[in-house]
Image (tube, helix red, strand yellow):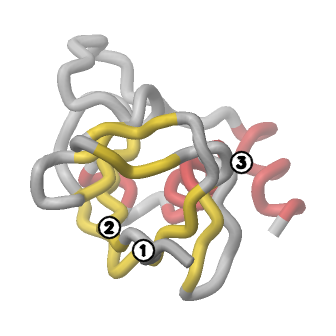
Amino acid sequence: MAEIPKMLAVTLRNSAIRRPYWIKGIIKSLGLKKGPIYLLKNTEVTCGKLKHLSALVIVKHVTIRNYANPYGTSRLNERGELFLGDPLNLNPTLGNLTPEEHKKIQKED
C-alpha cells in the first residue's frame, strides 16, 4: 500500500476564527470527512498540486491565513500545506455565507 500523504489544512481568512462554519463548509466542499484521517475524494497529492485520483490525507492542523476569499481553488505549496482557497484571487468579496447556507451546514453536521 502506498504511503498516506500528510499535509496541513490552511484556511485563507482571519475571520474564519470567528466563523468556524466557514472551515466546516470548506472541508465539506472538498469532500473531507470528520476525524483525524480525512478522505479527500478524487484527489492525489503530487508535484505540489492536487490531481484527480483518490488519496487519504491526514490533516495535521488548521492555520488561518489572511487572504481574500476562503472559498475557491485549493492548492498545495512546497511544504505540503493545503491552501483551501486561492491566495491569488483578487476578488475583494468577503466570502460570507448567507444565513441559509450557514443553517444548512449546521444541520448537516
The C terminus lies in quadrant: bottom right
Q: Quadrant of residue 56?
A: bottom right
User: Which amino acid does the dot numbered 1 rest on?
Assistant: Val
Horizontally, is 35 left or right of 43 in the view? right
Residue marked by disc 1: 59
Residue marked by disc 3: 102
Q: Distance between the residues labelled 3 and 1?
A: 23 Å
Name the element at disc 1: strand
Vertically, is 14 above or below 9? above
Vertically, is 47 above or below 79? above
Q: How crowded is mark 2: few (under 14 residues within 10 Å), some or many (20 or more)?
A: some
Residue in view at x 70 percent, y 68 percent? 33
Q: Which of marks 2 and 3 is nearer the N terminus?
A: 2
Residue marked by disc 2: 7
Q: How crowded is mark 1: few (under 14 residues within 10 Å), some or many (20 or more)?
A: many
Name the element at disc 3: helix
Q: Position of residue 83 (x, y in %)?
A: 30, 47
Given residues 46 and 71, the one toward you in this image is 46
